[in-house]
């Protein structure tokens, strides 16, 4: 861990103010999977993701100077007060208070909502924590107006990571890279960086259609799944595999070699679920319809010579990835061959986006 960078994120105390801000942050879908972490949300292996466009969380935060008592906040989701979310947010604020000590001098009203339905196979914790962290950084930039743009987004990613690891990748787009690796010295375990400058144009408009196989509650949370990697018999090899796959994928993201892209992305998805099936306790998140969709994707790719592929998050739903030029053909394929395997025939159409923005 780079403790010099860590110390750079510690802010000074300031005089509390009335302040209102609102930010939108996207969810993301990992291509190189992060599964397993150390203390302080430090990843066991680097990860790389597409930042999405339409699947976003919008968060508004009202800051008020505290009059007395301990730091407190109210949290509203979809216009309803949600006290059940407070424990997780209290852990988050406890983790970040040393980096933004001015927070303790304020009371907060947090209002958040998503553009996508709950339990829809999209990582809402990533977009929610990223949008909240950007609101916090917006006030810090108000206190310290000389703050440069690079540091603003870097610290926002740093704070978001302490709420949800994958949230580090939901600040910048179109492709975010989080975690130290052999290929890029500018990477960090503390925050994600943007891969946009060197990205091949084909990936800047890549499509992600999310096939909603099962919108039920998972049998095990992602947090518990991460914890099971501590004693996993294949953990060290998995972390090495992910690092090697990242080293192979980075030049592919520059060259635009889609066939090579497909091989790595699908391998990563299956490797993630292999870790779940071989942990103690073991568990299976994919469903029979997940496997049916995967097989039909493979058959379609072989017969039609259209470079579609899949990836999976920690769940049963399938993210169908493909270049923009094939959108009409792929959507037709979904309607005729795939949507019958989705819950209520539902799917969401999204694509690679540019990252968070102030509202």
Image (spheres, rainbow, N blue to C red):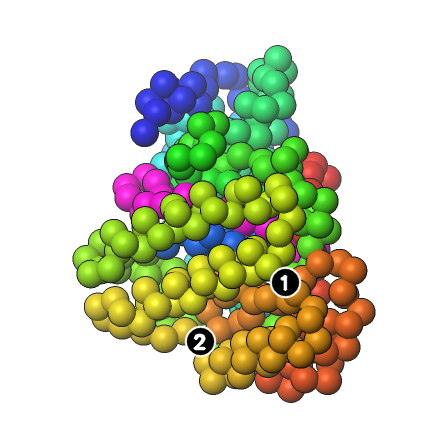
Residues rendered magenta in the picture: 36-55
Mark 1 lies on a secondary structure that is strand
* Magenta stretch encompasses residue 213: no
Q: Residue at x 44, y 28 (%)?
A: 185
How far across and how far down the image is residue 273, in percent? 39, 67
Helix, strand or loop under label 2: loop
Q: Are marks 1 and 2 in contact (CB under 8 Å)?
A: no
Q: Earlier in the sequence, mark 1 or mark 2?
A: 2
What residue is pinned by disc 2? 286
x then y, percent, for residue 4: 36, 18
Q: Is residue 51 magenta?
A: yes
- Which of discs 1 and 2 lies nearer the camera? The answer is 1
Q: Mark 1, residues whose alpha carbon is within 10 Å: few (<14), some, or many (≥20)? A: many
Magenta stretch, overall SS: strand
In front of the other: 259 or 77: 259
Label 2: how many Cα within 10 Å (few below 14, some 14–19, many 20+):
some
Q: In the visual, does 228 lie left or right of 287?
A: left
Which residue is disc 1 drawn over?
321
Quadrant (top left/top right/bottom left/bottom right) for the N terminus: top left
Q: Looking at the image, can residue 224 be seen?
A: yes
Residue that appears at 58% across and 36% down: 194
Q: Residue at x 59, y 17 (%)?
A: 147
Of residue 164 and residue 52, the one placed in the foreground of this image is 52
21 in relation to 169, above or below: above
- Looking at the image, how many numbered discs can be counted on the residues? 2
């Amino acid at each position: 861990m780079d403790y010099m960078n860590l110390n750079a994120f510690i802010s000074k105390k300031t005089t509390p103010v009335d302040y209102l801000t609102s930010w939108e942050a996207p969810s993301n879908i990992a291509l190189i999977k992060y599964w397993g972490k150390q203390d302080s949300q430090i990843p066991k292996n680097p990860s790389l993701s597409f930042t999405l466009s339409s699947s976003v969380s919008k968060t508004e935060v009202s800051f008020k100077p505290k009059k007395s008592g301990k730091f407190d906040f109210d949290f509203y989701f979809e216009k309803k007060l949600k006290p059940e979310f407070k424990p997780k947010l209290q852990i988050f604020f406890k983790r970040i208070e040393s980096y933004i000590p001015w927070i303790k001098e304020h009371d907060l009203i947090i209002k958040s909502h998503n553009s996508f339905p709950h339990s829809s196979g999209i990582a809402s914790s990533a977009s929610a924590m990223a949008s909240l962290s950007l609101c916090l950084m917006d006030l810090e930039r108000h206190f310290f107006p000389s703050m440069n743009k690079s540091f603003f987004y870097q610290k926002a990613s740093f704070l978001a990571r302490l709420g949800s690891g994958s949230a580090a990748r939901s600040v910048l787009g179109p492709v975010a890279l989080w975690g130290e690796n052999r290929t890029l010295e500018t990477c960090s375990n503390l925050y994600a960086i943007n891969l946009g400058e060197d990205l091949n144009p084909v990936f800047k408009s890549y499509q992600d259609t999310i096939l909603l196989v099962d919108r039920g509650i998972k049998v095990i949370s992602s947090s518990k799944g991460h914890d099971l990697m501590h004693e996993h018999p294949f953990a060290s090899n998995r972390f090495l595999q992910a690092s090697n796959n990242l080293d192979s994928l980075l030049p592919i993201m520059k060259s635009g070699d889609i066939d090579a892209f497909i091989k790595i992305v699908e391998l990563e998805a299956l490797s993630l679920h292999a870790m779940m099936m071989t942990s103690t306790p073991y568990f299976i998140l994919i469903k029979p319809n997940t496997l049916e969709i995967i097989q039909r994707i493979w058959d379609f790719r072989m017969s039609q010579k259209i470079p579609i592929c899949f990836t999976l998050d920690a769940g049963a739903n399938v993210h169908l990835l493909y270049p923009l030029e094939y959108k009409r053909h792929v959507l037709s394929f979904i309607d005729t061959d795939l949507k019958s395997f989705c819950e209520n025939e539902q799917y969401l159409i999204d694509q690679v986006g540019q990252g968070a923005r102030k509202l």
